[in-house]
Image: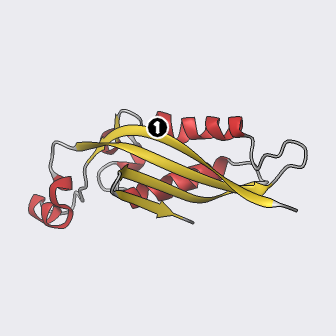
Amino acid sequence: MSRASLTRRVAFAAAHRYRRPEWTDERNEAVFGACARPHYHGHSYVCDVTVEGEIDPITGFVVDLGELDTILSEEVHRRFDHRNINLEVPEFADGLLVPTGENLARFIFDRIAARLPDANRVTRVTVAEDKTLSATYTG
């Protein structure tokens, strides 16, 4: 069978800050720098999700793009767009996941993987905060 991959991009704007609640403000700033400041900061994120599967001999698709778009809308765009990740996404609340690009990529990877049809698998999620910084999780 012929296998291929497809990458879909989704964008979202969100605010966050890096902070460990068990650390002092001084230690948070020493480790996380300006990203630890209490007033948060935002990014226009770009998230690329790569899905692999067999090419359907009838449709020529690796995955139903409409189904993938629905999953990405629910798991990425609706969850993160115009949100304060620390305050509005429970998995990233203080004391849980620090909303780094690495943690966002892994979190999104896991959410997408859980919802894909059995014939597909997510192979890569890249989350870019800007043109100069991105993190990729490959599972």
For the image, the number of numbered tags is: 1
Residue 109 occupies quadrant = bottom right
Residue 31's spot in the image, x, y percent?
Answer: 19, 67
Q: Is residue 87 above or below residue 34?
A: above
x 40%, y 52%: residue: 128
Query: Looking at the image, which is closer to me, 116 or 94?
Result: 116
Q: Please name the amino acid that badge 1 sits on.
A: Arg
Residue 122's spot in the image, x, y percent?
Answer: 64, 57
x 34%, y 58%: residue: 133
x 57%, y 50%: residue: 111
Going by the image, does 120 lie left or right of 96?
right
Residue 15 occupies quadrant = top left
Residue 98's spot in the image, x, y percent?
Answer: 33, 56
Residue 99's spot in the image, x, y percent?
Answer: 35, 53
SS at circle 1: helix
Residue projecting furthest to the left: 26
Which residue was labeled with disc 1?
A: 79
- Indicate the quadrant containing the C terminus: top left, top right, bottom left or bottom right: bottom right
